[in-house]
Amino acid sequence: MFRSGLFWGGAVCFGLSAGVAFADGHASTITIATVNNGDMITMQGLMGDFNEKHPDITVEWVTLEENVLRQNVTTDISTGGGAYDILTIGTYEVPIWGNNGWLVSLNDLPSEYNIDDVIPAIRGGLSVDGELYAAPFYGESSFTMYRKDLMEKASLEMPEAPTWDFIREAAAAMTDRDNEINGICARGKAGWGENMALLTSMSNSFGARWFDENWTAQFDSEPWANTINFYLGMMEESGPAGAANNGFNENLTLFQQGKCGIWIDATSAGQFVVNSDSTVADQVGFALAPDTGLGKRGNWLWAWSLAIPTSSQQQDAAKTFINWATGPAYSALVAESKGWVAVPPGTRTSLYENENYLNAAPFAAMTIESMGTADPTNPTVDPVPYTGVQFVAIPEFAGIATQVGQQISSALAGQQSGADALAASQELTIEEMEAAGY
């Protein structure tokens, strides 16, 4: 399933039909917009269970690449388009859209959902004034994945809590381009949720920030120059060719094929680098995201979640699906059909108390530690007027960060210098924030 169907290039629309059109008028069809990652595709593969339990609900999927999904659902909900009954969104959108009155409260999910089992930090990130506006499908932080055999060959040992300097040194030592081994794989594809998720988190650990306490852009600061110069230098020394086109899925493929020594990315990747699709499954180690000794690590906090727009005409059917897809019974279903290692991580406390899961998932302990140490309310070394580790929780961020991501991605592609990318980022951020009234 994962090997052949994990990466879907564009929109994929199809019905996983319950196959029943009831004459009593109670049949419903719901349309779900989702992202093309492994956990979501696993869910689509298990739809037989939902169809059997709810033959009166037909589910149609719109599966999109991450950047396209974000643009698509944002346009739809902000215009009240009503194209979707369920949206796959994250901890950036939920508080803003919930506060705007664009999402349906999920406080009335049935008791079997067991809301008290949801990890408090994730639950809090998906709530506004006590109202839960999205149900987490999986939660994640970010951490370091590495090849133990390549580390041993380089006569190095990965610390549990590495520094960025050590990561760069180790990546250079492991790089063997004649044999297609890249010491470091990291996001380069432009997008506020792609390269800017990594770079914003990374910049926090270098002492940078998006804005000072007066909402003045900070891309002209020394910490941002240090961040980007380090990133570009490390990628030039040890990164793969064409890195400016690589996001999560592309780097996952490289790592599974044995072409990355170190990959710093989402903890949710853990199951995919140790499953049967990975050619290096028995050689993968895990460590915390790197730091520079300034008190902040480059680990983010995120939850891909399911939410219902108020424009949906099928809200009851949508809630039925969300209860199935994010409730405790779904974890048991995945464990039974795919094994405990494949259970969506990072949403429920009980999963990290389950010996079956802990024994099957060598990344579990590092995942929960990374999630527990991410600090979205105090993400930076110096004070800031915003929350969010890998994003700034204001509506303007997505548009600005997409443009900044394009500038830095072009620098990674060699089309301009890092200094020029930062200068352009400073200018466009000032213009956008002034236009927004800051």
Image (cartoon, rainbow, N blue to C red):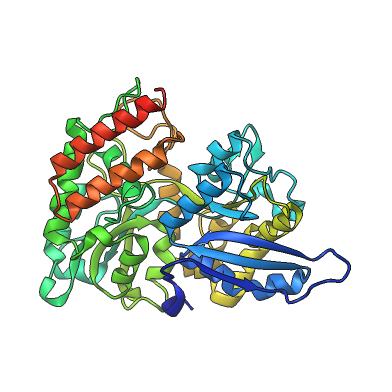
Compared with 48, 396 (above or below) is above
**Residue occupying the point 41% across, 42% down:** 398
Can residue 298 be seen at all in this image of the molecule?
no
**Residue occupying the point 27% across, 40% down:** 203
Quadrant of image for the C terminus: top left
Looking at the picture, tell me which residue is in the foreground, 95 or 417: 417
Looking at the picture, tell me which residue is in the foreground, 49 or 24: 24
Which residue occupies the extreme right position in the image? Answer: 24
Compared with 339, 198 (above or below) is above
Can residue 135 be seen at all in this image of the molecule?
yes
* Residue 230 position in % (x across, y down): 16, 46
**Residue occupying the point 73% across, 52% down:** 313
* Residue 374 position in % (x across, y down): 41, 42
Q: Quadrant of residue 328?
A: bottom right
Q: Quadrant of residue 189?
A: bottom left
Compared with 388, 40 (above or below) is below
Which residue occupies the extreme top position in the image? Answer: 214
* Residue 124 position in % (x across, y down): 57, 39
Looking at the picture, tell me which residue is in the foreground, 76 or 45: 76
Looking at the picture, tell me which residue is in the foreground, 142 or 424: 424
Picture mark count: 0
Q: Quadrant of residue 388?
A: top left
* Residue 112 position in % (x across, y down): 74, 55
Task: Describe residue 311's horizontal placement relative to residue 372 as left or right.
Answer: right
Task: Describe residue 9's horizontal placement relative to residue 324 as left or right.
Answer: left
**Residue occupying the point 65% across, 34% down:** 130
